[in-house]
Structure formats: structure tokens, C-alpha cells
Image (cartoon, rainbow, N blue to C red):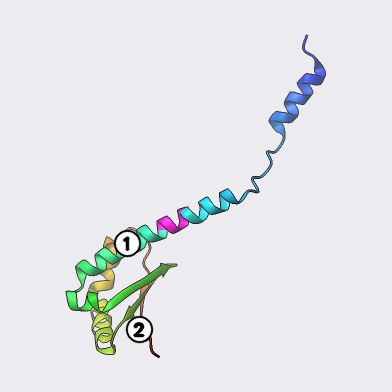
């Protein structure tokens, strides 16, 4: 017959909750994973942006980030901003949405602020 005290101790080990990992390693790994995913998603959008826009418009704009489906783009001049906005309304946004593997709800364009301003 088995020792009842050992049996109870074994049951306690199996049924008890494991202690949470309170080390910083878990947090750092989570941040790394999140950054890697964001970088990959933005990289995919940059490639699509450069492919679908004419070279002069692609060079005049910079994709700054995507969060919650909102792509933030800075444009170097108001004339280029107007042209990109027109293209987005004429189907560029729909084309980006259909080819992008993430969530893209809308594109927010803003005029680039100069360094000396």
C-alpha cells in the first residue's frame, strides 16, 4: 500500500497553481515579439505603397506607423498631399486594403513639419 502522506503531497504538487514568472525576461520577449510584428506589417505596407504610387509621390511621403488600422503618412508638400489624397479616394485605399495582410481602416495624411520650424 502507498504512503498516504506522500500521495497527498503528490496531489498538492499536481493540483497547485504554478507561480507566475515575475522576471523581466517575459516582458522583454513580449515587447520584442510585438516590435517584430509591427516592423513586418509596416514593411509590407511600405512595399505596397511604393509599388502602387508613382515614384514622385512615394518619394515625397513617409509611412510613420500603423496602429489600430490607422496608417499615418507624412507628406513633404501640400500639393503632393492633395494628389495622394485624391488617389486614395479614387481606389488606392481599396487596393491597399485588399493586398495588405493586416487590418487597414484608413490612411491619415499630414504635412511634414520641417526641421527648422
| Residue 9 image offset from top left, x and y in percent | 77, 25
Number of other residues with Cα within 10 Å of mark 2, as a class: few under 14, some 14 to 19, many 20 or more: some
- Between discs 1 and 2, the one toward the N terminus: 1
Helix, strand or loop status at disc 2: loop
Give the vertical position of 91 relative to 76 (above or below): above
Binning the other alpha carbons within 10 Å of mark 1 as few (below 14), some (14 to 19) or many (20 upward) gives some
Pinpoint residue 26: horizontal percent, then vertical percent. 57, 49
Residue plotted at (78% across, 9% down): 1
Front residue of 31 and 91: 31
In front of the other: 44 or 105 = 44
Residue 35 magenta-highlighted: yes
Q: Which mark is residue 43?
A: 1
> Image quadrant for the C terminus?
bottom left
Identify the residue under disc 2: 112
Q: Residue at x 38, y 89 (%)?
A: 116
Q: Which residue lies furthest to the front in this view?
A: 116
Q: In this rendering, is residue 74 above or below 13?
A: below
Image height of 112 relative to 96, above or below: below
Q: Which residues fall within the magenta stretch?
A: 33-37
Which quadrant of the view contains residue 87?
Answer: bottom left
Q: Which residue lies furthest to the top in this view?
A: 1
Query: What type of secondary structure mainly makes up the magenta span?
Result: helix
Q: Residue at x 23, y 69 (%)?
A: 50
**Quadrant in the rendering for residue 78:** bottom left
Front in this rendered view, residue 100 or 32: 32
Amino acid at each position: 500500500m502507498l504512503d498516504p502522506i506522500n500521495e497527498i503531497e503528490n496531489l498538492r504538487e499536481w493540483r497547485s497553481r504554478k507561480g507566475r514568472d515575475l522576471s523581466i525576461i517575459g516582458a522583454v520577449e513580449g515587447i520584442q515579439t510585438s516590435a517584430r510584428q509591427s516592423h513586418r506589417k509596416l514593411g509590407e505596407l511600405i512595399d505596397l505603397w511604393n509599388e502602387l504610387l508613382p515614384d514622385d509621390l512615394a518619394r515625397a511621403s513617409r509611412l510613420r506607423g500603423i496602429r489600430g488600422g490607422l496608417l499615418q503618412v507624412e507628406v513633404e508638400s501640400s500639393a503632393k498631399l492633395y494628389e495622394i489624397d485624391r488617389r486614395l479616394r479614387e481606389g488606392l485605399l481599396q487596393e491597399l486594403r485588399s493586398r495588405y495582410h493586416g487590418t487597414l481602416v484608413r490612411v491619415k495624411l499630414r504635412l511634414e513639419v520641417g526641421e527648422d520650424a
